[in-house]
Image (tube, rainbow, N blue to C red):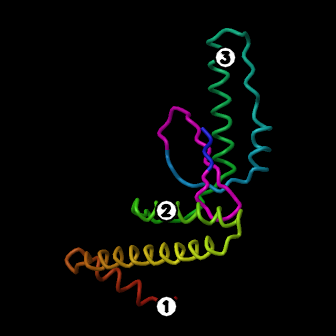
């Protein structure tokens, strides 16, 4: 399955390619070297069925899917060391609305739309900052000396950067 994400305010649209190989689906964002992917896929043997029976075709299709999955894994690396911040649905909705207004402004260049877009940008930034701050406060409040988490966090702050 191929899914184009148009939530970004830039002209570049990320694409999510989902391959179902029968194994558990792991959702991570990958950065893929497509030239390397093409090279690796071209060097894998093409699964040609010995006959045109349904069973042979199914086996060939499964092997082709496995080849594509293997080449994708070999040519990719995780995009982020840590998973991206999970935002609440109301902030995500504001981001989608802001992105739609931004695209509309790019097409029309209407000053009133630009003002609305900039207002939405600052509002989204403020909401994300508040959400991150409250998350951090909850994290700090959960630290206790009994579990050792308080001392571990303090030692991280004491290390020279």
Label ID, residue 83: 2
Q: Nearer the viewer, residue 82 or 93?
A: 93
At mark 3, the secondary structure is helix
Kindly identify the residue that appears in the image at 63 percent across and 11 percent down: 54
At mark 2, the secondary structure is loop
**How far from the left and from the top, in percent, is residue 101?**
59, 64
Query: In the image, is residue 125 part of the stretch drawn in magenta?
Result: no
- What residue does disc 1 label? 160
Q: How many marks?
A: 3
Work out whether 48 lies above or below 115.
above
At mark 1, the secondary structure is loop
90 left or right of 47 in image: left
**How far from the left and from the top, in percent, is residue 57?**
67, 16
Work out whether 90 lies above or below 5.
below
- What residue does disc 3 label? 57
Give the CA distance from mark 1 to mark 3.
61 Å
Q: Nearer the viewer, residue 41 or 9?
A: 9
Query: In the image, is residue 7 part of the stretch drawn in magenta?
Result: yes
**How far from the left and from the top, in percent, is residue 38?**
78, 44
Q: Earlier in the sequence, mark 2 or mark 1?
A: 2
- Please tell me how crowded label 1 is: few (under 14), some (14-19), or many (20+) other residues with Cα within 10 Å: few
Give the CA distance from mark 2 to mark 1.
25 Å
Give the CA distance from mark 3 to mark 2.
39 Å
Q: Main secondary structure of the magenta part?
A: loop
Q: Write the start and end of the magenta stretch as one range.
A: 5-25
Kindly identify the residue that appears in the image at 45 percent across and 78 percent down: 126
146 left or right of 93 in image: left
């Amino acid at each position: 399955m191929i899914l184009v994400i148009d939530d970004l305010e830039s002209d570049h649209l990320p694409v999510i390619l989902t391959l179902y190989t029968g194994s558990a689906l792991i959702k991570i964002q990958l950065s893929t070297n497509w030239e390397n992917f093409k090279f690796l896929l071209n060097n894998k043997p093409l699964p040609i069925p010995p006959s045109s029976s349904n069973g042979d075709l199914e086996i060939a299709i499964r092997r082709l899917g496995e080849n594509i999955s293997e080449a994708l894994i070999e040519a990719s690396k995780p995009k982020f060391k840590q998973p991206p911040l999970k935002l609440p649905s109301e902030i995500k909705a504001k981001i989608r609305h802001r992105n739609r207004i931004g695209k509309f402004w790019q097409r029309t260049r209407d000053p009133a739309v630009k003002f609305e877009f900039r207002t939405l940008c600052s509002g989204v930034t403020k909401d994300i900052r508040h959400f991150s701050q409250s998350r951090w406060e909850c994290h700090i409040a959960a630290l206790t000396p009994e579990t050792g988490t308080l001392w571990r966090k303090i030692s991280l702050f004491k290390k020279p950067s």
